[in-house]
Image (spheres, grey):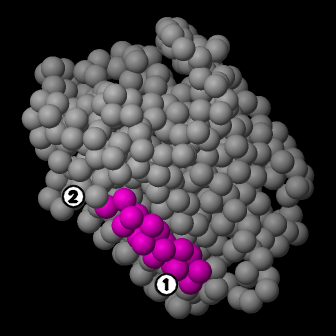
Amino acid sequence: MSSAAGTSTWKQPKAVYAVAFACVVSFMGIGLVDPILPALSEQLDATPSQVSLLFTSYLVVTAVAMLATGWVSSRIGAKKTLVTGLAIIVVFSALAGLSGSIDGIVGFRAGWGLGNALFIATSLAVIVASATGGFAGAIVLYEAALGLGIAAGPLVGGLLGDVSWRGPFFGVAVLMAVALLATVVLLDDVPKPAVTTPLSAPLKALRHRSLLTMAITAVLYNWGFFTMLGYAPYPMELGAVQLGWVFFGWGLLVAVFSVVAAPRLQARFGTAPSLYGALGFFAVLLLLIGLFTDVRWALISCVVASGMVVGVNNTLTTQAVMLVSPAERPVASAAYGFVRFIGGGLAPFVAGKMVDTWDIHVPFVVGAVAVALGIVVLATGHRVLAAADAGLVGDAHGPVDDVAGEVADEFGGAPAAIDSEVTAAHASARVR
């Protein structure tokens, strides 16, 4: 794949690949603990609902910290923010591996979440600033790193977890330390923005109904997603390595459908119809998991198949946020991340309470209902998503200006503020 300027997407400075490698390791953390959840529950005498707090503490802290990432990076610079986030992840992942109780691991995962927020909120901006070939090539690299990390995380977690449940935590600490060193040595300082970002900027951005619509849709989707990620491993009754291979298959589908299938579906059917289809399919899969939780082959098949819709949803919702939000990209990303990670963090905790009160079927059925509601919420923004698609396939800046006008008229925003955002996404889509 090449950029508009004819430069290969994959011929990048070493600094870009240093940050991309750190992205891979960071995204590995999403599924890294999945294969060791049953082992943690058994060896640390913890209930599944207690173990689910590994997701809750990590994601809720990530969500809240997202609100401050723009404030931090605009004052100390992107490289220092990136390095700080990586260092925090190294320290707290190692401490989690050294811990001897579930409460200790949950607490250290919270610290890990702080570092993760600083890193993921800054990494894309650093890649965009450092990559050759412009925004389009940077997005492809970022999505490739995301897909590779999500795919590799469960497998690495399973292989290391088969030795000891501490293995995945120490593995992340070592890999992140390598990424930290590479980033310090290879990445030049990224210029600070001319204007600092206030702490209130992400929350103010949520006043725009376009961004709020996408964020609420993401909360409902993440409710189902993290319910599946947090509780599906238990009824499978598999070893750590076997669970690792199951979620590796899931992760491969996430990667392929994120980078390859999503843009093709978008080009053929449009953003909104593609998202309706992905969310609808995911709701059906969650319902099937809820109904056939005790049938191992059906459970595994549905979990692996969900990788397809997760990949499509990841790519298209991220792009849609950039297209429809009147806020600047870093602010919109922080606001969107805050809302969606809150939902992802609370879902496993609530699912645990449902399992304790009723049975393990209930959380998946509730997750299916939540995802279905996400389709209803998303439909309220159909007009703006359709206008965004018009901008993606149009020429020059005429359609882009139309998208800006649609957002301003429909949801209340400033066309000038989103013009550069839509133009960037427009260029990305044209390359793809």
Identify which residue, 336 or 190, lies in the foreground.
336
At horizontal 47% and vertical 52% (from top left) the residue drawn is 209
At horizontal 72% and vertical 71% (from top left) the residue drawn is 350
Q: Are marks 2 and 1 in contact (CB under 8 Å)?
A: no
Residue type pointed to by label 2 = Gly
Q: Which residues are magenta?
A: 365-382
Residue 287, numbered circle: 1
User: At numbered mark 2, what does the secondary structure look like: helix, strand or loop?
Assistant: loop
Q: Is residue 203 left or right of residue 108?
A: left
* Prevailing SS of the magenta stretch: helix
Residue 270, numbered circle: 2
Residue type pointed to by label 1 = Leu
Residue 131 seen in the current view: yes
User: At numbered mark 1, what does the secondary structure look like: helix, strand or loop?
Assistant: helix
| CA–CA distance in space, label 2 to label 1 | 26 Å
Residue 190, numbered circle: none
Residue 33 x, y percent position in the rendering: 65, 56
Give the answer, above or below, for where 431 lies relative to 310: above
On the image, which quarter does residue 302 sit in? bottom left
Residue 325 x, y percent position in the rendering: 41, 42
- Badge 1 density bin: few <14, some 14–19, many ≥20, Cα 10 Å: many
